[in-house]
Amino acid sequence: MRLRFPFVMDCGLYTTSYQEDMAILFAPGAKVKVACIMAFFLFFPQLVNGLFGEPGLYYVSVTNLVAIAVIGALGLNILTGFTGQISIGHGAFMGVGAYTVGILTTKLGLSYWAALPLAGIAAAVVGAFFGIPSLRLKGLYLAIATLAAQVIIEYTIIHWPGLTGGSAGIVLQTPKLGSVSLSSDVPFYYFALLIVTVAVVCTVNLFRSRVGRAFMAVRDRDIAAAVMGISLLKYKVMAFGLSAFYAGIAGALLVTYNRVITPEWFSADVSIQYLAMIIIGGLGSVMGSIYGAAFMTLLPILLREFAGFLGNYFPNVEQSLIAMETALFGLTIILFLIFEPEGLAKLWNDIKNYFRLWPFSY
Amino acid sequence: MRSRALWVVLLCTFLSVALIASGCGKKKEAAAPSHESKEPVKIGGIFDLTGGTGDVGEPYAKGANAYIDYINSKGGINGRQVDLIDFDYKYDKTKAVEIYNKLVKQDKVTAILGWGTGDTEALKQIIAGDKIPYISGSYSEGLLDIDQCPYNFLVAASYSDQARIAIKWIKENWKGAGKPKIAFVFNDTPFGRSPIDDAKKFAVENGFEVVADEVVDLKALDATTQVLDLKQKKADFAIIQGTSNLTATVLKDAKKNGVTTQFIGLNWAADEKVIQLAGDAAEGYIGVIPFAFPYEDVPGMAAIKEYLASQGEKLEKINQKFVQGWCSTMVMLEGVKRAGDNLTGEGIKAGLESLSEFDTGGLSAPVTFTPESHRGSEKVRLAKVTNGRFEYLTDWIGYK
């Protein structure tokens, strides 16, 4: 039951029962909004096809890259944003997932559908293993320890050609769903959409459960958490495993889409990029992971289009603007850290609340 | 609160500008002259201008652009203008895939001029699926597997072949006692590692002793540790697989530390830039040269000279990588020409596969493609830096 005066927007949230207070779809109209967003994404390929014809497929392919990044960023956010354990090994954990799919399907002839969950599990096991030092190490020291995980895994991949194909990599047999190839844009889009939806719903609910709350307790003060009866070993390792599970699935999807697995895809810069995603998107926010992943994937593309557009009027400005991209990324991260440490998610909420609570926000 | 409002305004401005920009993003098509009767041919370009290999990638991209300008000024191909839609991918494979998708899906290009080994390898399955003839700046042996990569074409000898030719040349000219000791200097990327295994195998078969592997980063400013290791292991020869920066660093540090190893650089490690950067230290350095230098007097250079003159530039301003880009584009467009009006991936592939001893006017070895092999050439020349200039030691030679 909510009280409302019809001529102003809400000036606060008045929930009268515990159920209402804990609802995921909290604000009024949220169900309609979520339904609209889902409908938009369900018909997105048809929409771009209608708007741009066949070249619209490019937009679907960009969305696919975003979807993969979203899954990876969600995983890292569980670990870094919610549990407070920094990891620079995320790219390598993606690699573990990717190579598991590659090796299981090409060398052992396993079905892709069996290999995909196994990829997540393999990454989770490796991730949990490299998470063990987190019991003793914190902050910067843990960052370096996970960087070591990144380097060790990368080195193993490159220097074990018998298993991983070395630098030439593995060519994946295109997984098929009936007669449809999963590597083509539209089928992959729906598959990725399904997985992203499941991942988002699972993650949102995770933080309404004991496990999720334990993660946050560990993040806020691990000694206090231990006093409250939270086993640090169990939950820290679990956070690493869970995070790596998401990474493994993201890596497996990445190679499904690209059909070739090479070590290049899983280098340390990938790990850094994921860290940047969750910082820009919002540490400790599920929606933030999505915004951050989309932002980091789309910014270079928008910048390129913008440069191309300017290039029509100011020749030569194009090259220099594109060359500034890395600097721009750095600047974005610094600005976010200073002005909005909680990232795009907080920014978006502020904008929403401004309008929702207008004119009386308390 | 004020800073927040500022943020909102900034974000909105950025988004709206970006939206407008992406709406008007069809840039180069608008600029192309519209008097031709036939549709233009669209060729995509994925180049590295500012990334790890930008030192050699930028002149290569310029050469490719220049050849297309030149052909367009001569009336295009079969009466069609050629439209090159190219982007800088900063040697980043994720970007390469995204740009590839844009080129193929949005811009509908029929063929692509690519660049790096890592990204070309990563794209090979997609290239085969989309049937996009792809000439890349990478001459990796891995791209010659015709079943895996039916649409990849290599215009010059593969890195492995280049290394084998160098090894064979050393063997023929070895005057020292005992087994010649050979080492490999490379960067830890798919590009760098590409020829190493093949070359080692060939070296051992030819009675060499392989003494060391030295990994040097593409943008390294110091290679003292690596060259001292070469000195300690008494390597007589070291084959360099890298780009100009890496090579110059190695040569300088070798000279500084009194290393007597004879360095031999493969294609991307041997151009004028190495001499510029390394100065005296480059003296005596040997390069494996698949493409001509601008100062060579070969028939093909006349067109480059003519084009540069029309742009108010001089031959002295360009380097060998420009010629390489020019020449690779020439081969691609020859395939397009032979495809006639069948401007599909298959048509251009068939056109390229009909190239037999195709003469680039001395800019490279003659190029031959067949449906069974996309190994354009197996021949290179070796040149030694004497008085600040590469002077040829051999004619076009192979290793077989």
Image: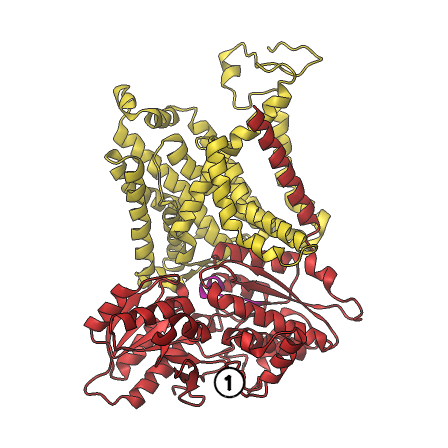
Whether residue B219 is visible: yes
Q: Colour of chain B?
A: red
How many numbered marks does the figure carry? 1
Q: Relative to A339, is A265 above or below?
A: below
What crowding class fits label 1: few (fewer than 14 Cα within 10 Å), some (14-19), or many (20 or more)? many
B226 and A203: which is toward the camera: B226
Q: Colour of chain A?
A: yellow
B136 and B25: which is toward the camera: B25
**Residue B118 included in the magenta stretch of the image:** yes
**Residue A212 included in the magenta stretch of the image:** no
Part of the protein shown in magenta: B113-121
Name the side, left or right, on which B17 lies relative to B294.
right
Quarter of the picture containing the C terminus of chain B is bottom left
Quarter of the picture containing the N terminus of chain B is top right
Q: Which chain is disc 1 placed on?
A: B
Q: Relative to A184, is B166 above or below?
A: below
Tell me the residue that label 1 is attached to: B365
- Where is residue B181? Give x, y as percent: 23, 79
Name the side, left or right, on which A19 lies relative to A142.
right
- Where is residue A337? Give x, y as percent: 46, 34
For image coordinates 31% across by 85% down, the residue present is B170
Q: Which amino acid does the dot numbered 1 rest on?
A: Ala
Asked where in the image residue B20 lies, by quadrant, the reply is top right
- Where is residue B293? Give x, y as percent: 50, 81
